Image (cartoon, rainbow, N blue to C red):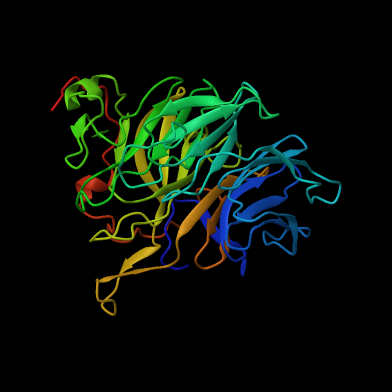
């Protein structure tokens, strides 16, 4: 914990330990925190009943094999497995009632089976369906997309495509526009492909598997139907922001609370799980996307220190857990899950008088790759 660094005035504490494979999270207005546990196949309900900032009550709220995505809309919970979208009423004791299967034929998970679901301002559900592979021509049109449908499962359609694996996404509160972080392709090198921050629009295609970053061509795959790379790039939308390759963005949350200082309100926070094959490693942190007047302006570190230099490690680096879920509580605190250590952290703001801890050395690769910032549209085609 002493290695962890936040902006001045912020503090981080442990909310719950021994939580197991803690993945995606959502919190209710009464302060109940729900976390999906993929390996355990359930949703765990956590409560702080005495107000000390630590969970003192826990109970399994629902069970389903391979549960991962979760969304709350009023008293209704929506849950997602690899192939299913389910809903259930939230009972008086906080547990979920009988699970109702809305759909059970989402495509096979393959390499990316971890679905997520977000309720939109239009009342529709938006479900991420990752690619089955690193880079390939999918046989099911719903793979590598975000699918939308009504809360009863009707009207299902592909909302946006060409998204390799977008787990962290959400709607900007003031404009209602959808933004998300997409996982880049592996095996193009330590510094390729950057993680992409996209403004996700209905009907748009975002390039995967043939085009990445600012219309760069994937040398390992050829566009279908005799199309050239340039033709495919013209029909694909470029990202509006880039981040260090292989950092693995997970759950994202727009901050709508009042507990953080004004400059943080309306910003997006995303848990970066961390690389598994990059040298030096990247990720293992929480990033902040600075939004001003409803528009993204920059990407910068918010919480660092889960990755440190270590002379005891053969790679020269040591990690403290793997980050997964990020959710805002009704009191304005941010909750962060670590599914490797079975810990859920709670991030709060204590005031400007709190001493700031020194930031650790840059552990995300080259300094110029740590924060590439926002990029504008590019007309260049390679």
The x and y percentages for residue 37 are 61, 58
Left or right: 5 as drawn, with respect to 40: left
Corner quadrant of residue 322: bottom left
Q: Which residue is drawn at the image coordinates 39% and 35% (left, top)?
A: 163
Quick one: which residue is furthest to the bottom in this view?
A: 312
Left or right: 42 as drawn, with respect to 132: right
The x and y percentages for residue 93 are 85, 51
The x and y percentages for residue 65 are 64, 56
Vertical arrangement, residue 103 with respect to residue 133, above or below: above
Quick one: which residue is furthest to the left in this view?
A: 382
Corner quadrant of residue 206: top left
Q: Which residue is drawn at the image coordinates 56% and 62% (left, top)?
A: 21
Q: Quadrant of the C terminus?
A: top left
Q: Is residue 244 visible?
A: yes
Q: How many marks?
A: 0
The x and y percentages for residue 296 are 39, 29
Q: Which residue is drawn at the image coordinates 55% and 35% (left, top)?
A: 127
Task: Using the image as rendered, state which of residue 359 and residue 23 is in the foreground.
Answer: 23
Q: Is residue 303 visible?
A: no
Corner quadrant of residue 102: top right
Vertical arrangement, residue 126 with respect to residue 112, above or below: above
Vertical arrangement, residue 102 with respect to residue 91, above or below: above
């Amino acid at each position: 914990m002493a290695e962890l660094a936040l902006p001045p005035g912020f503090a981080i504490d442990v909310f719950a330990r021994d939580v197991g494979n803690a993945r995606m999270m959502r919190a209710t207005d009464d302060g109940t925190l729900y976390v999906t546990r993929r390996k355990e196949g359930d949703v765990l309900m956590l409560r702080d009943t005495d107000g000390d900032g630590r969970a003192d009550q826990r109970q399994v709220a629902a069970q389903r094999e391979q549960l991962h995505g979760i969304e709350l809309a009023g008293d209704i919970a929506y849950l997602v497995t690899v192939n299913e979208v389910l809903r259930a009423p939230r009972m008086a004791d906080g547990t979920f009632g009988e699970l109702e299967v809305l759909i059970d034929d989402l495509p096979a998970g393959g390499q990316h089976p971890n679905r997520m679901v977000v309720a939109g301002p239009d009342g529709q559900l938006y479900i991420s369906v990752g690619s089955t592979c690193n880079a390939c021509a999918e046989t099911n049109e719903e793979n590598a997309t975000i699918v939308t449908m009504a809360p009863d499962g009707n009207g299902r359609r592909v909302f946006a495509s060409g998204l390799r694996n977008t787990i962290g996404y959400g709607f900007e509160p003031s404009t209602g526009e959808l933004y998300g972080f997409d996982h880049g392709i592996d095996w193009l090198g330590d510094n390729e492909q950057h993680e992409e921050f996209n403004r996700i629009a209905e009907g748009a295609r975002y390039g995967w598997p043939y085009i990445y970053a600012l219309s760069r061509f994937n040398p390992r795959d050829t566009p279908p139907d005799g199309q050239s790379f340039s033709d495919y790039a013209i029909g694909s939308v470029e990202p509006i922001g880039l981040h260090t390759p292989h950092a693995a963005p997970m759950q994202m949350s727009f901050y709508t609370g009042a507990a953080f200082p004004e400059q943080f309100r309306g910003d997006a926070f995303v848990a970066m799980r961390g690389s598994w094959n990059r040298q030096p490693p990247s990720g293992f942190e929480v990033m902040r996307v600075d939004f001003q007047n409803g528009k993204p302006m920059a990407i910068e570190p918010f919480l660092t220190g889960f990755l440190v230099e270590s002379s005891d490690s053969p790679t020269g680096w040591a990690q403290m857990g793997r980050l997964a879920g990020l959710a805002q509580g009704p009191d304005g605190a941010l909750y962060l899950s670590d599914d490797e250590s079975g810990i859920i952290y709670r991030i709060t703001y204590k005031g400007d008088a709190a001493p700031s801890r020194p930031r650790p050395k840059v552990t995300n690769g080259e300094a110029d790759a740590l924060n590439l910032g926002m990029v504008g549209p590019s007309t260049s085609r390679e």
